[in-house]
Amino acid sequence: MKGLALKLISAVIVLILLFALAPFGTVPAGHRGVKTTFGSPSNEVLSEGIHFRFPLAQKINLVNVSIQKGEGEGDAASRDLQIVHTRVALNYHVKPEGAVSVFRDLGNEPGERMIIPSVQEAVKAVTARFTAEELIAKRTDVRDQIVAQLRERLARHAIVVDEFSIVNFNFSKSFNEAIEAKTTAEQLKLKAERDLLRIEVEARQRVAQARAEAESLAIQRQQVTPELIRLREMENQRLAIEKWDGKLPNVSGGAVPFINVK
């Protein structure tokens, strides 16, 4: 009995040591593992799942390879020396096969050591190619050029750019006021041009109407002949006879008018 008890105690101690020393490590979904032996990383990338390690001597370090989002903002100068405050958003992920490189070269901190400085540099470099007004009007071109620079720079460190967007451009108060004044002036100019066009069209319409009326009167005058005048007089006399009731007008007072009968 005493020997059996010792065996049970020994087994329990071994189990406790196994759990305490943890000879197995787990790599969860969305990550890759980098095994280090006394701090030295191996070149093998551990996939998701359970992996063996030597307790105390080896450690499994996790590298996030899922899509991550980062936002940042900073100031830059445009080509016409306007100060531009830019806010951007970036989605990126670490290449699974590049997990060892990210762990070894970037200290497993790609966001702080590579993403942020790369975005700042790309934004400043591209912003300097455009004037402040062009940054607004050609926003898509600006974004595409920034993305191209980022992808080229980050690809060397096993980082992939998934999405990039310019959240907002902000300029100085004086520049915003100048843009607003220019926009107002352009709107007033367009309104004046539309009013002038409307006036010209209405004037042409009045001229055309007057010309048509004049031509109509001229045609009517050409159609008036002595025969037409005589016909109209006969029609008027006929209408007067039809309306006459057969009674002569009564005259009261005064002298009887003299009628010269030949």
Image (tube, rainbow, N blue to C red):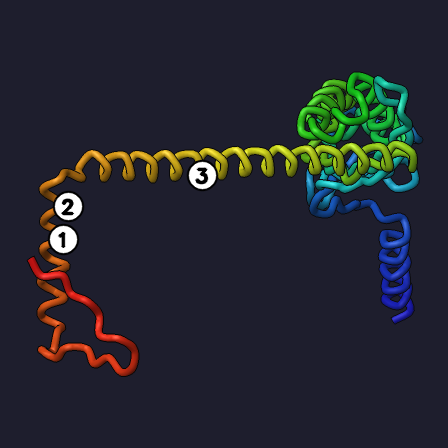
Which of the 4 image quarters holds residue 153? top right
As displayed, is residue 138 above or below residue 53? Answer: above
Which of the 4 image quarters holds residue 168? top right
The circle drawn on residue 212 is: none
Element carrying mark 1:
helix
Which residue is drawn at the image coordinates 9% and 70% (left, top)?
242
Residue depth check, mark 3 versus mark 1: number of the one nearer the observer: 1
Judge by depth and name the residue closer to the eye, 204 or 211: 211
Judge by depth and name the residue closer to the eye, 90 or 25: 90
Residue type (three-letter) at the residue carrying disc 3: Arg
Q: Estimate the x, y position of residue 197 in percent, counting from the top left.
A: 55, 34
Judge by depth and name the residue closer to the eye, 82 or 189: 189
The residue under label 1 is 233
Give the mark nearer the N terminus: 2 vs 3. Answer: 3
As displayed, is residue 186 above or below residue 4? Answer: above
Visible in this render: residue 143?
yes
Which residue is drawn at the image coordinates 89% and 59% (left, top)?
10
**Label 3 environment density (alpha carbons within 10 Å; few <14, some 14–19, many ≥20):** few
Residue type (three-letter) at the residue carrying disc 2: Ile
As displayed, is residue 24 above or below residue 212? Answer: below
Q: Are marks 1 and 2 in contact (CB under 8 Å)?
A: yes
The residue under label 3 is 206
Q: CA distance from mark 2 to mark 3?
A: 33 Å
Horizontally, residue 125 falls left or right of residue 2, namely: left
Q: CA distance from mark 1 to mark 2?
A: 6 Å
Give the mark nearer the N terminus: 3 vs 1. Answer: 3
The residue under label 2 is 229
Residue type (three-letter) at the residue carrying disc 1: Glu
